[in-house]
Amino acid sequence: MSSDKEFVIGLDLGGTFLKYALGTPEGNLLVTKKRSSKGHEAKEEIFGVIFKAIDELLEKAKVLGGKVIAIGFGSPGAINFETGTQIGETPNLPQWIDSDIRGEIENRYNIPVWADNDANVMAFAESRMGAARGYKYLIALTLGTGIGGGILLNNEIFRGANYAGAELGHVSIDFNGPQCNCGGRGCIERYASATGMVQNYCAKKNIDKKNVNTELIFERAREGEPEAVQTIEETCNCLGAALASMVNMFNPEIIVIGGGVAEAGDGFIEKIKKAVQARAMGPALRNLELVKAKLDNKAGMVGAICMAAEMYKKSYTTNKAV
Amino acid sequence: MSSDKEFVIGLDLGGTFLKYALGTPEGNLLVTKKRSSKGHEAKEEIFGVIFKAIDELLEKAKVLGGKVIAIGFGSPGAINFETGTQIGETPNLPQWIDSDIRGEIENRYNIPVWADNDANVMAFAESRMGAARGYKYLIALTLGTGIGGGILLNNEIFRGANYAGAELGHVSIDFNGPQCNCGGRGCIERYASATGMVQNYCAKKNIDKKNVNTELIFERAREGEPEAVQTIEETCNCLGAALASMVNMFNPEIIVIGGGVAEAGDGFIEKIKKAVQARAMGPALRNLELVKAKLDNKAGMVGAICMAAEMYKKSYTTNKAV
């Protein structure tokens, strides 16, 4: 047994930035950084960025008198959690598909790696260090350019049969609704993502989308502008409808709403909650919580660290029984 | 060790009938019977029917030279699987709520009892003895007066945090759609249950619902009547939309469609499959099967037997490791 302190690295890959952190196995962040992810370049370039980040954090760990026992990784798209390989398409990282995330990093550093979808990792973060601590059945939505979804069932990330589940942005609320990029119609992402809100607002005002963002819509709503107020009402109503279907299916204990849009204030969360309560079934609504995410910008790093630490513990402790 | 043959009893309680069977632990039925469930009478009356059925099957077991090791029970509404107690409302068994199913039966017979929601039990039956043998991730829909749903994840029934999940009939496909009894709007049950189909068809024909059922609609469709053909097209399209959302969330390996409506023929199943393929996301569609249920009328009894047998094995064998 070494008396070294044990650290875990968490990496959160996006189309624009790689965010990376050194933390304790419990998910407390000691160092956080970010750098350009070179998302549109070749796989090798992206791995180059990742290696630089890890090198930097390994150095930090040494300075802090400890060693890195595990690395966690969150990435857009579907990831085979067993193999640590990217399988789904990732529009903002077009050449990242099929990347052997675990293989490339383990080969270089000989530290065990676990990789998962970024929305799964964020849901995990909220369950371990955020707004959903202590809850075992959790639905997490991240409202950004799109809508990301993560699900915990019986305290574990739910991924589906082929790691393609939990696509909560692609729950349809109108089978005759607008065509979605995913192939479906009327997906909630079309209505309640930042993109969907801006589109809805601009259509009401008959103005160009340029220079319009959700902050502006929320600001104008606070000033009482009817189109802005209505846009927000409609967003919450649509989210309530999609979430009610999810509640009837998953019967979660808690729903966590994160992402830029959710930052608009408690009124927004309250409105969504009311819409869910008006639509979902009684037995599944009993004791259901609906709250704002706590970790937001850091959720990816915290979740990657917590996930890797738990998997390390399960895989490398003497008694493998859980 | 006794050399007695081991049997399991399966009970399937409905508003009109109690169906009951004696079977092998593998789910092969040896004796099947049914009697009036006295669904609208008091709890004690319903338990009276259940006790008569069990007495009858215990006698049969003796004649066959064996003993009953476990009893499985399927009932409408939500059931606390840990305690074997009815918790949800059951419109067709209005006084059945809060029934201590396990307690009453175990007290009388001293045989271990497991009780679960009937749609869960039917999904379990299809996974063990029906159309979904060997699949670990399964969604089962039963299209009847309403729409029942059962979900298997990683080979186990998924019930949600409070046994209120898997209400697949109450996934909304139109957030502005017609009000559903459940409190929601545009639930798939409103469109694609037998009730929904008949309503849709009669509205198109501007006729009274009396004497119209789904068999008639399917017959007229075969004769080429446009309203009947259109009703079926619309039903399949709506089912496809609801199932696509479920596929994007649960990423199942197989979808099993049962109930009277599904008996209409393979064309119906093919149409639903096409609608799902047109709407769900690529990664979740890969290798997805969509098939007709095999056990239908017997699914409740078979599932109750298989579930009780598996739980008995887990609970009462020397090595409890699974």
Image (cartoon, coloured by chain):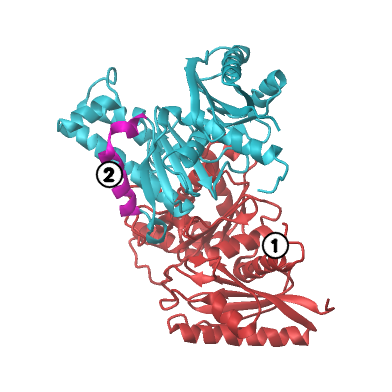
Chain colours: A red, B cyan
**Pointers 1 and 2 in contact (C-beta within 8 Å):** no
The foreground one among A237 and B279 is B279
Task: Tell me where residue A51 sits by quadrant.
Answer: bottom right
Quadrant of the snapshot with the N terminus of chain A = bottom right
- Foreground residue, A9 or A280? A9
B113 or A141, nearer to the observer:
B113
Q: Position of residue B236 (x, y in %)?
A: 30, 41
Segment colored magenta: B260-279
- Element marked by disc 1: helix
**What residue does disc 2 label?**
B271
Per the picture, the main secondary structure of the magenta-coloured stretch is helix
Residue A203: image x %, image y %? Answer: 34, 59
Looking at the image, is A18 positioned above or below residue A314?
below
Q: Residue at x 27, y 17 (%)?
A: B211
Q: Quadrant of the C terminus of chain A?
A: bottom right
Location of mark 1 (residue):
A129
The subunit letter for the residue under badge 1 reads A
Q: CA distance from mark 1 to mark 2?
A: 46 Å
Q: Is residue A193 left or right of residue A55?
A: left
Q: Residue B263 in the image: x percent, y percent?
A: 32, 32
Q: Tell me: residue B28, above or below residue B241.
A: above
